[in-house]
Amino acid sequence: MSIAGRLNALLMTSAFVLILLLCVAITQREYASNRDALLLQASAVAAGKPELAVAIHFKTAPQLAVAAEDFLALSPAVKRVRMFSNIGDELHSSVAPWARDSISPSLTELRANTSPLDEALTRFSSDTVPPNMEVFSLLIPEIELVRTIPVVSLIDPLREGLMREDFAISMLDPTAAKSLFVIGYIEIAISRTSLLLVGAPTFALSAGGGLILLLIFWFIVRTSTRKITEPLGKLARLADDVAAGRQVDPLPVSGGGEVRHITEILNGIIAGMVRHKKAIEVDRKMLNMKVDRREEQLTLQRKELDEAKEKVSATEDRLRHLAYFDLLTGLPNRRLFSEQLSLLLRLALRHGERLALLILDIDHFKRVNDSLGTDAGDQLLREVALRLEKSLRSSDLAHRSSKKEALMDLSRMGGDEFAVVLNKLPDEAAAIQVASRILKAMERPFRIGESEVTISVTMGIALTPAHGKNTESLFRAADTAMMSGKKQGRNCIQVYDDGMVTANKERLRLENDLRRARDRKQLIVHYQPQVNGRTAEVTGAEALVRWSHPDHGLIPPDQWIPIAEELGLITDIGNWVLDQACRDLAELRRSGRDLASISVNISALQLTDSFVDVVSETLKRTRLSANSLQLELTEGLMIGEQKNAVALVEQLKNLGIRLSIDDFGTGYSALSYLTQFPLDELKVDRSFVLGIADSPQNAELVKAILAMGKSLGLGIVVEGVERVDELKFFREQNVDCIQGFLFSPAVPIKKLHELLEPEHFKRSLELLEEQLKGDSMQIEKA
Ligand code: C2E
Ligand code: CA
Ligand code: CA
């Protein structure tokens, strides 16, 4: 409800109540005067009827009736008229027709405590109301007003022989009035309800007047409250508009008092809101801009991420293939073959079947490599693999239960060595039959490029269960058989027999020599520098162990480190290399050469709980800071069985040593291990570098590996860079650290001393750059 409405209601209610009270007061007054007038009239009528005393005294009924009628005629409100003798006997009663049922009280009741000469007025409540007034009487209950008037005379009514004339005479003789005597009483009962209704017209009149007054008042109130509250209403509407943001212009300030004050406040609010709105608008625009930019960045990042993911999964696929298959021939490698063989072996033993392992080695393969080059050697290996496959597929003797199995029964074991498994053989002769067919197939000359090459092969055969019941023993037996064939002049097939064990004496001697190699000080450490391909700065060097054998000369580590691992000598040898490398670095620095760090290869078998102490003691002993040492770990360690590998590597890391992942990608593993170990550097293996300049596919793979390494925040070192175009490739890929024969092979410490001369690799790089320029000029010319 509006303020004006409320004000109106309040004033009008007050006015209504006031006027109502006024009407009631007027009606009340009217009633009182009507009543008093009627009572006066009644007294006057009684006083004006001297004959009434006579009639009462003599109980003259007709006269009493006439007199009663006169009283009844005074007003319609007169309900009842009764006459009493002075001792209270009712002499006459006249009642209005509607009041016949009303109860009539006795004179004593009517006149209690009133002196005989006084008029009395008594009130009784009554249920008898004039007709059609029942409803009204519910509002204002009916009251009977009863007047009793004494009728007096100068004559003592108790006088003996009193006659009518005596009354008349007493009237005429005022002197006779010596005393007054009560002759009787008249009762006049008046109905209050009827009396009230007599005043009804006055009430109606005053009510009508009141109504008109009320209307006039209403009109005045309405106009004036409107005038007073109009500015407030306007302000309220404006405030609504301001709140809803519809009002943005300041309001005109007019008038005075509170309205002016409120208008000014509202203007303040409007100004504030406009400022706020503008600020929000600017904020929103900026936010939108930021959101747009962020979205763009996100889409870009998502795209890059998708690409990276694709690359990584392609890399993983590729690596998985590399892990199980030989890159050159596409045949299963030693690992896959061994796994397959052990499976077949278990089945064969369970079912009592005969199984043969055949090892094939090309005779004098080195000669092909030396005379025709390694490319020709590679091609020959591929051709041999193809012929082997063909001759096996045409063989109905080698049972295969599935196509997949068929692909697994042939393997390139490495170098020029192949292996074949022959399953479910009826007898030894069947194995020899297959081997003979292979031997024959190899006799035909091979076409390698321009030239024809003729080769021979030597094969060793071992059968289960006779010659071995597990893969290792079976391999050893087949190997021994093959070696014995070589000794017997090559180009032959040898089935294993126990006598051949002596042929293994060679290996035994090697093992024994290896056990004593360290004590006899036959081990030496060579160092291969790692050079920045852009600045020619030497960033580090890798320590590579060699065995200087009295009979066989310098034996490269590939040939005996696995034996040392098998014999449990690797921890001893590895710790010695670590110590030697650290001492050499310290000595190098003492003599004034600057080398940031030295890298040492760590075999997976070396990494035991005590290794962390060995490293920290070695550092202490040689007084080298931890960051001078870098350890090269292999994938095998990270995906191996060793449970606490992560913890051990973390302990090494905590010493402050830098850690590299060596030969990355050469074994099969999910790349997830990379994130588990706290690595600093990734060494790209030589096998990935080979052929990079010729095969776009290889180049892509290397790029993916580099991208992944960089995304993991790893430093990159590329191993085995031999050619200047390889250097060019890696420089283009922003890889700086190069380790390879292009700069230097591994050299004795003395020679490293010379290589660390400041200008040494600068000169080499200048030459290489000239070569690069020459190449590109040649390409341009072409
Ligand atoms: P690796 O750790 O991958 O070491 C790199 C090998 O690649 C070295 O062979 C190095 O001479 C050779 N290399 C470097 N650049 C070129 C290049 O441009 N062309 C070619 N063809 N070869 C290059 P190395 O010295 O014969 O060592 C062979 C492997 O023996 C090493 O591979 C490493 O796994 C193991 N090894 C060497 N010393 C130790 C050692 O002290 N402890 C352990 N546990 N293993 C060692
Ligand atoms: Ca290494
Ligand atoms: Ca390596």
Image (spheres, rainbow, N blue to C red):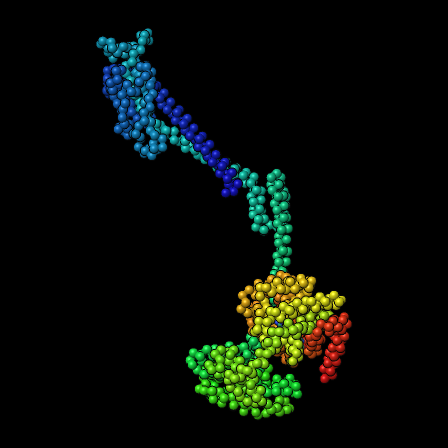
- In the rendered view of the protein, which quadrant contains the C terminus? bottom right
Q: Is residue 166 above or below residue 449?
A: above
Viewer-nearest residue: 545 or 109: 545
**Which residue is drawn at the image coordinates 50% and 41% (left, top)?**
5
At a point 61% along the width and 90% down the height, the residue shown is 453
Nearest the camera: 502 or 39? 502
Where is residue 409? Give x, y as percent.
50, 82
On screen, residue 689 versus residue 118, left or right, reads right
**614 left or right, relative to 755:** left
User: Can residue 402 be spotted in the picture?
Assistant: no
Image-quadrant location for residue 736: bottom right
Extreme residue toward the left, this view? 161
- Picture coordinates of residue 656, whole percent (x, y): 65, 62
The answer to which image quadrant residue 544 occupies is bottom right
x then y, percent, for residue 59? 23, 17
Indicate left or right for 81 with 337 as reference.
left
